[in-house]
Image: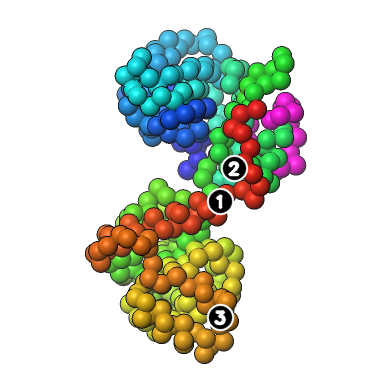
């Protein structure tokens, strides 16, 4: 669920609320630009980093809610700056600029319409930091709205991959206000996990809220826990190699079934296809050597065989308990995903 859909739902359940977004982070700050949280009169969702900064933000957001009147115009926004120093009782030494956006029943129809439009997670959310203008969503780099030139340029750079997919504050030209752009949702790497044994179960728990869309595969539905973790799609099939062959380009694969023969067949299917982001196989260096020998006999080129990662996980994290293996493997996957998400060209400054 996107954050816009979450707000539309929360308005119906809790009434008015404020979204607090970190729109500029200088120096040492608890969270990165784009981090956000929802503040209601009696509930909080997510975090901008905790500590005194967050307490101040919550208090200010609830003050805005308390001051709401029936005749207030829609799309109310306010910006506040916080120095993370002695005045806040913090020693980070950084500076945070926060955007406070009030959402009520007046904004709910627009939010619901944006949700129904079915924009992909890769879409961008645009709005000025001044009050009055509704949120806008853009998913095509060819889109051309009534935006300042710097905003149009930034949108096209992000959607074409020339700029990182992260929140960015665009300073307005002379006579124009600033705008904030952020992704609607996180792009998730397709991750195919073969095997619902102890390590597989531990791993899907650790992967919760990490940037992966998990397809969890095994030969029998009874091997999966009930209920499934919310970010997981289960696939029970007798033909795991066929599932591997049909995976989308760039997908990550982790092979840890109950059978070495089945492990080999899945690895062969992934390597034979060639268009994958990562292939990890649970096991030892000895297992890797044996698999490489057998896969070479099956016609897999040496250059492709080198992409088989076994053992899996980050080096230096000991322990063979399922939980320890899961933490190590998840850390390795995040490291790979972050490296793969970097833009092809030099990063731009966060503000223009």
Above or below — where is 25 with respect to 2? above
State the SS at label 1.
helix
The residue where tag 2 is placed is 164
Mark 1 — residue?
Answer: 341
Instruction: Please tell me in which quadrant of the rendered image residue 137 appears.
Output: top right
Magenta span of residues? 135-151
Find residue 338 and report its horizontal and vertical position in percent.
50, 51
Q: Residue at x 64, y 23 (%)?
A: 171
Q: Position of residue 37 (x, y in %)?
A: 42, 30
Front position in the image: 93 or 319: 93
Q: CA distance from mark 1 to mark 3?
A: 27 Å
Q: Secondary structure at mark 2?
A: loop
Secondary structure at numbered mark 3: helix
Do tag 1 and tag 2 residues touch (Cβ < 8 Å)?
A: yes
Label annotation for residue 302 = 3
In reply to whether residue 206 is colored magenta, the answer given is no
Task: Name the front one of labels 1 and 3.
Answer: 3
Nearest the eye: 183 or 301: 301
Label 2 – label 3 distance at C-alpha: 34 Å
**Alpha carbon of mark 1 to alpha carbon of mark 2: how far?**
8 Å
């Amino acid at each position: 669920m996107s954050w816009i859909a979450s707000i539309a739902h929360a308005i119906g359940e809790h009434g008015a609320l404020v979204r607090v977004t970190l729109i500029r982070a200088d120096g040492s700050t608890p969270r990165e630009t784009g981090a956000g949280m929802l503040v209601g009169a009696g509930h909080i969702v997510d975090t901008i980093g905790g500590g005194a900064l967050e307490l101040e933000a919550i208090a200010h957001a609830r003050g805005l809610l308390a001051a709401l009147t029936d005749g207030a115009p829609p799309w109310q926004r306010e910006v506040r700056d916080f120095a993370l120093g002695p005045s806040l009782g913090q020693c980070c030494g950084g500076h945070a600029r926060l955007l406070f956006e009030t959402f009520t029943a007046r904004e709910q129809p627009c939010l619901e319409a944006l949700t129904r439009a079915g924009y992909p997670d890769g879409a961008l959310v645009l709005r000025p930091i001044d009050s009055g203008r509704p949120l806008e969503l853009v998913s095509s780099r060819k889109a051309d709205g009534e935006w300042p030139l710097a905003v149009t340029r930034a949108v096209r750079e992000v959607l074409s991959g020339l700029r990182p997919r992260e929140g960015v504050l665009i300073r307005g030209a002379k006579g124009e206000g600033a705008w904030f752009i952020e992704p609607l949702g996180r792009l998730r790497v397709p991750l195919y996990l073969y095997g619902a044994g102890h390590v597989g179960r531990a791993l899907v728990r650790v992967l919760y809220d990490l940037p992966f869309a998990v397809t969890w595969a095994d030969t029998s539905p009874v091997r999966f826990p009930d209920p499934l973790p919310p970010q997981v799609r289960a696939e029970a099939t007798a033909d795991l190699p066929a599932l591997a062959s049909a995976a989308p380009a760039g997908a990550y694969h982790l092979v840890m079934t109950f059978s070495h023969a089945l492990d080999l067949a899945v690895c062969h299917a992934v390597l034979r296809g060639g268009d994958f982001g990562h292939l990890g196989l649970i096991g030892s260096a000895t297992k890797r050597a044996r698999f490489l020998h057998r896969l070479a006999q099956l016609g897999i080129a040496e250059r492709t065989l080198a992409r088989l990662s076994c053992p899996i996980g980050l080096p230096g994290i000991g322990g063979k308990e399922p939980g320890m293996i899961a933490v190590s493997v998840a850390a390795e996957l995040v490291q790979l995903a972050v490296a793969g998400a970097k833009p092809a060209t030099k990063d731009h400054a966060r503000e223009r």
